[in-house]
Amino acid sequence: MNTLSIRAFIPPLTRRAVPLRATTRSYAVQTAGGPTAEIFSQQHKWMQKERAARDVETSRSVDYLRDEVASRLCERILDINRHFPHVLDLGANACNIAHQLTLPSEQAPDAGPRGSRIGKLTAADSSAALLHRDADLPFNKEINIERQVLPASEALPYDANTFDAVLSSLSMHWINDLPGVLAQVNNMLKPDSPFIGVMMGGDSLFELRTSLQLAELDRRGGVSTHTSPLADVRDVGGLLQKAGFNLLTVDVDDIVVDFPDVFALMKDLQAMGESNAVISREKGAIQRDVLLAAEGIYRALHGNEDGSLPATFRLIYMIGWKQSSNQAKPLERGTGMFSIKDYLEKNGCDK
């Protein structure tokens, strides 16, 4: 019996020659100033600040930290003996720096307001509600201030050589691309102009961090992200230098605030708009049993004798100057005409 093969009905394969054409390959590149790794959710942080600013009285009642830090920052401005025609307050929050500039220095109360050498202050922040929260207060009439809402906190819409000084108080610890923002600040400064900033860093709120971690480890057998990572003081100098700043000064200051309990501390942080905004944070509220355990651990490890709980805010102050041809520069090594060793030995300081 003959079998019929199906191959007889299948047409033979034909090869078609496709001419080669020159093609261009395109690559995805990162936008200038864009973060390499996004740690903080800028959208969530904006929502926190907007929500906090809507409750005006509560928001003003927790400005004690921002006002104190802004006051200390303004004292550093007085150390620079020059006039600043146009100054930028980057991440102005509720214009705390502007308010403090209208007040006299505690060290020289008869010398007039601290902002007497500032011609115009531009206050910029991404949260319109927080930026305009105190726009109707009397201090606005005592200083030439302009408020600008930033469309994005990490892409600054200012031209090069625009400002005679840039200030920033308690806002840069939420920046993802800190080196990129510092480079933009350097670009918008005029030559031989200073950047003076302060940010939370290091071991800020270490009491709350350790208490929450130990409580979660005990109650849940693991640790979640409830507090934000912060820059270390050892890194700030390198970041300023990488951004092109000269004549760097970096120092650390601690402010300790006492609270009746851990719940009062967390309530104030929320009212400030300083709650956790890490992208990898655990969604939802902290479990009640974890909070109760954290309260007991906080008191056992860090509590004061009077029953209050201390909260440490570590502040990193930084000053950097934009490079200029007429800027003072240190002498090269080996060019000294005088031995410091001989001087110390001569004056009996050889030990």
Image (tube, rainbow, N blue to C red):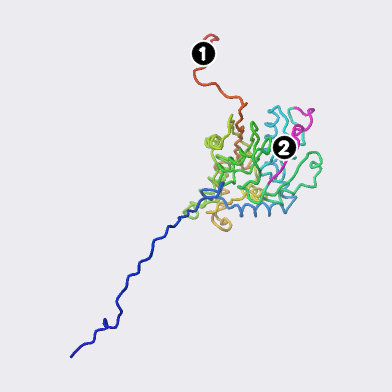
The amino acid sitting under disc 1 is Ser
* Extreme residue in the bottom direction: 1
Q: In this view, does 7 lie above or below 244?
A: below
Q: What numbered label is drawn on residue 257?
A: none
Q: Where is residue 144 in the image (x, y as percent from the top left)?
A: 78, 40
Let me know if residue 206 appears in the view. no
Label 1 close to label 2 by CB (< 8 Å): no
Q: Disc 1 and disc 2: Cα gap in Å?
A: 43 Å
Q: Give the range drawn in magenta.
A: 108-124
Work out whether residue 207 or residue 128 is closer to the camera in this orientation and state it: 128
User: Of tags 1 and 2, which is closer to the observer?
Assistant: 2
Q: What x and y, as percent, mark residue 255?
A: 63, 37
Which residue is painted at 75% across and 27% down in the image? 108
Dot 2, crowdedness within 10 Å: few (<14), some or many (≥20)? some
Report if residue 111 lies within the magenta region.
yes
Q: Which mark is residue 339?
A: 1
Residue at horizontal 65%, vertical 35%?
A: 190
* 228 relative position to 151: left or right: left
Indicate which disc residue 86 carries.
Answer: 2
Q: Nearer the viewer, residue 49 or 326?
A: 326
Q: Is residue 44 magenta?
A: no
Question: Which of 219/279 is in front?
Answer: 279
Q: From what the image shows, is residue 122 above or below residue 321?
A: below
Q: Residue 328, how many percent across, how many down?
A: 61, 24
Type of amino acid under label 2: His
Q: Is residue 234 found left or right of 116 in the rendered image?
A: left
109 vs 213: above or below = above
Left or right: 12, with 308 as reference point? left
Splitting the image into 4 quarters, where does residue 43 fall?
bottom right
